[in-house]
Amino acid sequence: MKNKLFKLLALCAIASMLLAACGGTAATQAPAEKVKVVIFVGMGTGTDPDQVDAQNALAEKYNSTHDNIEIEFLIVPHEEYATRYLAMLSGGNAPQLVGPNGISTVAEFFDTWEDVTPYIEAEKLDLSDFYGPAVELNTYPDKNTGLPLGLYPSYIYYNKDLFDAAGLDYPTHDFEDKSWNMDKLREYAMKLTVDKNGKNATDPDFDPENIVQYGYDDSWDGMRGTLADWGAENVGRPTTSDYKTAVADSPEWIQGLQWLSDGIWVDHFIGSAEVQAGRDSAGVDPFGPGTTGMFYSHTWFLAEGLHDLSFSADIAPFPYNPKGERIARIDADNFTIPKDAEHKQEAWEVMKWLTSPEIIVDVCRIYGCIPARKSVQDKFLEQLKADYPGIDYDVIFKSIDYLDKPNNEEWIPEWGKIEDALNNGLSLVYSGEEKDANKVLTDVNEEVQKILDEYWAAYP
Amino acid sequence: MNSSPRIGLARRESLWAYAFISPWILGFIIFTIGPMLASLFFSFTEYNIVDSPRWIGLTNYINLFRDELFWHSLGITFKYAIIALPLGLVFSYFIAVLLNQKITGINIWRTIYFLPSVIAGVAVALLWGRIFDPKFGILNPFLEQFGIKGPGWLADPQWAVPALVIMSLWSVGGNVIIYLAGLQGVPTELYDAAKVDGATAWQRFRHVTLPMTTPVIFYNLILGLIGTFQYFTEVYVLTNGTGNPARSTLFYNLYLYQNAFRYFHMGYASTMAWVLFLIVLVFTLLIFRSSDAWVYYEGQLRGR
């Protein structure tokens, strides 16, 4: 018995010595090691295999030129970003940097981000090279979430072959031409919508049950994005500026949603939820198969969808709204530092590097955004011309001037809950469950107001 | 004089027994009891995962019963359970009876019917997403052969839940295997006696097979009930976690997930988890209570 006890104690002693030895080695080497900055990728773009390779190459480039910091891109599947990020935070293992982050994911996890204002002020960092709107999109009343990386202005992608077949002029590229408005877009879209007999949606014999080609699509955006361009006082925000009153039932939003509803169910130039489901299950985007005349989307679609097309395509400005204003919603990306990150200063250094004039073009080419720095516009334009020949690049840069402000993705209280309430309204229209925009938005507004009231009751 | 060494031996054996099952006990405490107690605590707090939980007493429970989406999601879950659970039980029983026949190649048929059950829920969801596709799927063109215009299925708020019910029938292989084991355990002498008494095939099924397999029906009913109330993976995959179209597939667990990981109301989500636990517990107890009236165990006297 004593013998067994002795053996057991001896084993424990050896195990504890081994553990202590391991711990000691790590402790003594720590000061000599580089600080590792883990960059969490998955909140937005950055998870495609070619992007992963490009990011690894970027990491190698950084690590070979820096002695004190080492970067590593942690690639998380997009559908798991929320659970993985929150698990890392709650487990005390926060990443040092997160990105590329859209305005929406910045809003979604707003309370978790560090304010970078003190870092900017401490170094008196000159932000004048960044596009003004890009800086503004990251600046909130109580914090600046990060240095701008890129912008994703929006415009119409159009299929030139379908326009030619319909005998239509291409949409104007002249930003001053006010005849290019939502009525004109509807007119074009109806002529581009064709049934299996080849009749378009303006023809009395048109068969809406057997449509083979649609005129227009904006199905990749939510309610706020879809209606931000219609000129409501709060533009892309469903609340007043104090976030206390819901204004999702503004006349402009109702007009915009009714235009969409009629486009689906009366004029038939927009595909319904069924059409979208078909595309989703086939794994195709709305534009690529060549059965959509005009697709409203952002710059990121260049990288995602403008390759290997079997038809000619170009881009045109988004039309003027019925108030005679042009608003073209915008997305933007940045990198953010979690408040709980262990090495914030090092993360800030990496953020500066990723957005520096020397590297920002390379980074934006990975993610498909327009670099947020004015000084690299020409360099980037050359790159665009090589990557996407034949499109009107002016449309991309000029569209930035017409961005939505307040932005359609910006923070509001209970961001996720209100987004879901709004998008449920959009789903009602797309599915045909409710076609009256006034009814949809009145109900949605009531729900949003209730969410706001509960929020302010809890956080007076 | 002799009792002392015997007690020592018994104690030693007990210690060894505990030592052998300690990995399971530790796992149970750390990974089941621990999180359960933690979630019970969180259900009385406001907890956004990032900051420390703040005690708010019964507020989450009070708010839950005022939450329209809580009732909406509970209603959808009940609707699904009311259709899918009995349908699944009857369908799998029917298949098991068929697979219990003495025909050539029966083992191949049994394998074929069981195969879908070994496929992961995500893969099943993706597969059926394609099948239900109104434009490119195979189901609607099949229905068209009979002059039926198929609905939008998962894109149609009226048809989304029925589509999920149909999908659930595809994975009944697990139930079938259990039923099959039950069917094969029915003593053949009972059938022989019934035949001697002149019982028809239906009468033999009604008065021998069915009563003798009630314990496995009971077992599948309990597991099926728990499974339907925990329905999540398929709907999460098919709707990208939204519960659309028009919230028609916002199942209870999906709404719970949204509260936890999209709205960061982990305390509220914990409350939902405990309320769901209580609902399932009540229904399970009711079924257990009712089992005296309809579950027959061989050798058991009714009511004892």
Image: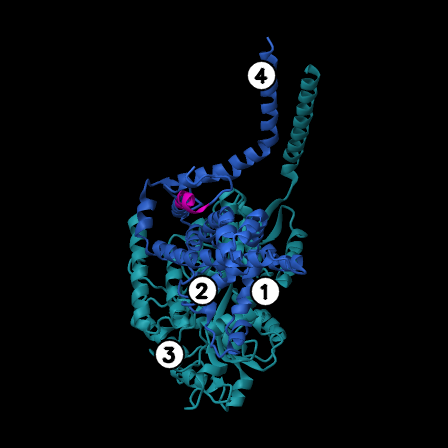
Chain colours: A cyan, B blue
Question: Residue A310 falls in which quadrant of the image?
Answer: bottom right
Segment tinted magenta in the rendering = B284-295
- Of residues A298 and B203, the one nearer the viewer is B203
Residue at mark 2: B162
Chain-order first, disc 1 or disc 3 = 3
Residue B168 x/y as whole percent: 51, 59
Q: In the rendered view, would you say B216 is above or below A164?
A: above
Front of the two marks 2 and 1: 2
The reply to the same-chain question for discs 1 and 3 is: yes
How far is mark 2 from mark 1, CA to CA?
50 Å
Front of the two marks 2 and 4: 4
- Of residues B208 and A218, the one nearer the viewer is B208
Residue at mark 3: A262
Front of the two marks 4 and 3: 4
Membership of A69 in magenta stretch: no
Tell me the amino acid under the disc marked 3: Asp
How far is mark 1 from mark 3, CA to CA?
42 Å
How far is mark 2 from mark 4, CA to CA?
62 Å
Image marks 4 and 1: residues in contact by CB distance under 8 Å? no
A267 left or right, relative to A457? right
Q: Chain of mark 3?
A: A
For image coordinates 64% across by 63% down, the residue present is A50
Tell me the amino acid under the disc marked 2: Pro
* Majority secondary structure in the magenta region: helix
Question: Residue B53 falls in which quadrant of the image?
Answer: top left
Q: Chain of mark 2?
A: B
Tell me the amino acid under the disc marked 1: Val
For image coordinates 30% across by 65% down, the residue present is A443
Tell me the amino acid under the disc marked 4: Ile
B278 left or right, relative to A124? left
Disc sitting over residue A361 in the figure: 1
